[in-house]
Image (cartoon, rainbow, N blue to C red):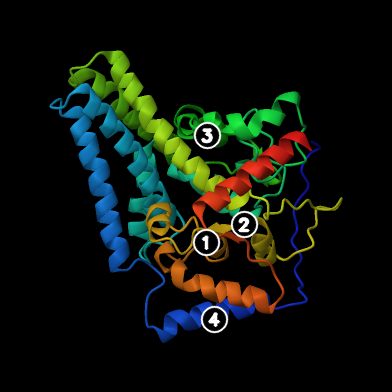
Amino acid sequence: MEKAKRIQFERKSSTDFYQVLSKRVEDYFKTNNISKHANGAMVFKTIFVLTVFILSYIGIISNVFGLGMVLFLFAVNGFFAAMIGFNISHDAVHDAYSSNKTLNRILGTTFNFLGTSDYVWKIKHNIVHHTYTNIPGHDSDIEDIPFIRLTEVQERKWNHRFQHIYMFFFYLFTTLSWVFKNDYVNFFRRDWGWYKNPDHPKVEYFRLFFYKALYYFMFLVLPFLVVDQPWYFILLGFVILHFVEGMTLALVFQLAHVVEEAQFPEPNDEGKLEDTWAVHQLRTTANFARKSWLANFICGGLNFQIEHHLFPAICHIHYTKLAPIVKQTASEFGLPYHEAKTFGGALMSHIRIMQRLGTA
C-alpha cells in the first residue's frame, strides 16, 4: 500500500444534517433537564461490574476453591473485564462518564488494570479510529488481525477463503495481543496512516511499563505464588480469562464496523473524501440489538455504534433515547442508518462479509 495521504473530509455539505441532529439532541437533554453524563442507572452498573470483577479476582487468589471453581472464576473475571472496558473505561477516556475530568481520568485508568494502556487507547481509538473510521490504511482497527482480510484493499491470499471459519480462533487472542504486544508496538510506532504519533510525555513511558508490570504481577505472578494449584493450571486460567475477554471484545467491535452494510470509503488521489465527517460515520458504522436490554447492559452502548461515533462525549446510558432521534433525522435527510435487529443477525452479516472478502 502506498504512503498514506492526508485525509480531508468534505467541509461543505448539501445538507445540514449534523447541525439539525445536534440541536435536536441538545433539545432532548434540555427539555428533560438531564445531564449528558452518568445517571443513577450508570452508577449502579459501574458498582455492580467493578464488584463482580474484584470479587472474582479475590476468589481466584483466595486459595479456598478447587480447580474447577478457580477456572470458572478466571472466565467470570475475563467477561467482566470486557464489561469494564465497554461500560466504564471506554466512557471515561471519552470524557463521557462525568463532567468532572478528574473523575474521568481516574475511571479511565481501569483500562490499565485490564492489561491495556489508557493512554495508547486514547490515541488509537479516540483520535485515529473515531476520525478515520473504516478508511483503509488509516484506521488500524481494520488492519490489526493477522491472517484476516477485512477490506478489499488488503491483498487476498489463498487462506482467506476459510477466514469466515478460522477468524473466531484469532478473535480469542485479542486481549492477549494487547497485553503482551500491541500496546508496546503502538506506543513506539511512528504513525497511524497519515496521523503522526506524538512525542509522548515522559510520565507516559513510566505509566506504560509500571501498569504493565503491575498487571503481570496481579494476574500471573501472585496467583502462581498463592494458589495451591500446579502452575500450568494457573496459566490455563489466565488464558481462559483472555479468551473470554478477547472473544467478547472482538465480536462487539467487529459487528459495529465489519458487516455487510458498513462501507470502507477510500479517498481520491488528493486524499479527499466525498462526505462530511458526520455522514462518513453513518456510512461506516452499524448498530445491533439496540432494543435488547441485555445487549445494552453488557455492551456499554457499543451496540449503538452510530450514536457513539456521532456523540462520543455523551454517556452511553442515554443512547437508547437518542437512537430514535438519530434514525429519524438520518431518514429525513436521505442518509443511511445501518442496524441489525439482533446480535445473531449482526453476527451472520459479519460472517457473510468475511466469507465474501475471502473469496471475492
Q: Earlier in the sequence, mark 4 or mark 2?
A: 4
Q: CA distance from mark 1 to mark 3?
A: 23 Å
Q: Earlier in the sequence, mark 2 or mark 1?
A: 2
Which of label 4 and label 2 is nearer to you?
2
For label 2, the residue is: 285
Residue that protrudes farthest toward the right in the picture: 269
Disc sitting over residue 171 in the figure:
3
Locate the C terminus by quadrant: top right
Q: Judge the density around disc 4: few (<14), some (14-19), many (≥20) Cα neighbours within 10 Å.
A: some
**Amino acid type of the residue tagged 4 in the rendering:** Arg
Q: Earlier in the sequence, mark 4 or mark 3?
A: 4
Q: CA distance from mark 4 to mark 2?
A: 21 Å
Residue contact at pointers 4 and 2, CB within 8 angstroms: no
The x, y position of residue 243, in whole percent, is: 42, 31
* Front one among 89 and 341: 341
**Amino acid type of the residue tagged 1 in the rendering:** His
Q: Judge the density around disc 2: few (<14), some (14-19), many (≥20) Cα neighbours within 10 Å.
A: many
Judge whether residue 33 can be spotted in this image.
yes
Q: Earlier in the sequence, mark 1 or mark 3?
A: 3
Residue contact at pointers 4 and 1, CB within 8 angstroms: no
For label 1, the residue is: 308
Q: From the viewer's perspective, is 8 left or right of 174? A: right
Q: From the viewer's perspective, is 92 left or right of 357? A: left
Secondary structure, mark 3, is helix
321 lies above or below 216: below
Judge whether residue 206 can be spotted in this image.
no
**Amino acid type of the residue tagged 2 in the rendering:** Thr
Disc sitting over residue 24 in the figure:
4
* Front one among 269 and 144: 144
Q: CA distance from mark 4 to mark 1?
A: 16 Å
